[in-house]
Image: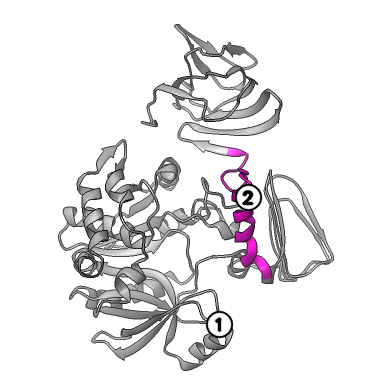
Amino acid sequence: MKIYPVILSGGAGTRLWPLSRAVLPKQLLPLVGEQTMLQDTALRLAGRPQLMAPLIVCGNEHRFLVAEQMREIKLLPLGILLEPVGRNTAPAVAAAAHYLRAIDPEAVMLVLPADHVIEDVEAFYQAIERAAVLVADGALATFGIVPTAPETGYGYIQSGKAAAAAQCYAVDRFVEKPDRSSAEGFVAAGNYFWNSGMFLLRADSYLRELEQFQPAIAGACEAAVRLGYRDLDFCRLDEASFTACPSDSIDYAVMEHTRHAIVVPADIGWSDVGSWSALWEVQPHDADGNVARGDVYLDGVSGSLVRAESRIVAVVGVSDLVVVETADAVLVAHKDQVQRVKQIVDHLKKQERTEHLHHTKVYRPWGCYEGIDIGERFQVKRITVNPGGKLSLQMHHHRAEHWIVVSGTARVTCGDKVSLLTENESTYIPIGMNHRLENPGKLPLHLIEVQSGSYLGEDDIVRFEDVYSRA
């Protein structure tokens, strides 16, 4: 049996603000170790004979980051499927199923969110092997996490009678996130498991059940894949078809209705890292129960998570706090109140601020830029262009730009003139002039950009040519 991992990398991770942002969500961040959560998920699957290269499903705005993170770990995915809009997990899995069925009519999908922690990988593979016996005959398997506490932040799955395979059970029902008393009763009963959001199922079996229970989703996703097209290393789903698709989770759309659902208990050291307190739990603690990362000074602190991204953070004489510093925001919260972080993000959206969207450092397919200073009619950025990177041929209606090379070599197109600039050299790009910046060298290009003009927004870009196929 060939098993095709399908990694769902479309979440926003708002409960991990200010580190997680819309354009750089938690699955693309190194939260637990040195690698990002997406990289950890992909590497967890590598080297197993039954498992094929993963198919990654992500949003259009994250495509270059996903591709670059796979390149960094030297893993070539089977494909990167781009959702034009988010439509929850049922359509994402349906699109992946159509894509895989065209490659292998008997494809079995291992559906995994990109942002989970699994500490006991061998136990996870054993659970997959147990599920595979029944999945081959058409069962739709979900992995139920053996609960370690009466958590109220997870949904639950109640198991029923034993299935034909060892340690597999029919699903009696799915339960929404319970109150504390109900959660305690579930744990005491012994036949309730945390809903992990991980599945093993044949592509054709899933699509057959989806067509029965949610024909609108099935039809829209079939059209989205059939009318999709290749774009560089990506597969773009047809925008009109996928946008018209109803939004629903795989649980609501299929698993709660099908007669073929089974649950496989899995005691695998699992966490969905859905909050700062959850991240504190899955990381090593010091003697005082603290988790510290970055330039951090602690004195008389216990049971806390402190993370510094851009400067020293000193914390003195407190307990059970979460302190997270980034270049443009600081969060201080009690560990018992971190679920309210989402309300901060909602507030930022209502105020039409940008701190929930992106960091001061913004990644692009050619490299990145970072805001240093901004004022009335001027803005200063630090720009890094990767070796071989090439910005689009573009112009601006409202701003001029000065570029000063700090290190590396820049090939600059300005109108009809092309020139090479090296360290300590500079150039000027007038308003309305077609221009392009490239790095023809073997080392990263670092430069300072000073913008001046009446409007400095990122939407004042008219692209004439772009090697990354951006609009």
CA distance separating discs 1 and 2: 29 Å
Q: Is residue 282 visible to us here?
A: yes
Q: Report x, y in % for residue 8.
A: 39, 57
Residue at the far left: name it. Answer: 105
Q: Secondary structure at mark 2?
A: helix
The secondary element bearing badge 1 is classed as loop
Q: Which residue is mark 2?
A: 348
Closer to the camera, 60 or 141?
60
**In the drawing, does residue 359 fall left or right of residue 119?**
right
Q: Earlier in the sequence, mark 1 or mark 2?
A: 1
Picture layout, residue 285 above or below residue 373: below
Q: Indicate the quadrant where residue 267 lies.
A: bottom left
| Front one among 129 and 208 | 208
Q: Which residues are magenta?
A: 337-361
Q: Which residue is mark 1?
A: 179
Q: How many marks?
A: 2
Q: Amino acid at mark 2?
A: Leu
Q: Is residue 331 magenta?
A: no
Task: Find residue 9 and report its image quarter.
Answer: bottom left
Quadrant showing the C terminus: top left
The numbered dot on residue 250 is: none
Q: Is residue 71 visible?
A: no
Check disc 1: other Cα within 10 Å, few if <14, some if 14-19, many if 20+: few
* Above or below: residue 373 compared with residue 247: above
Please name the amino acid that badge 1 sits on. Asp
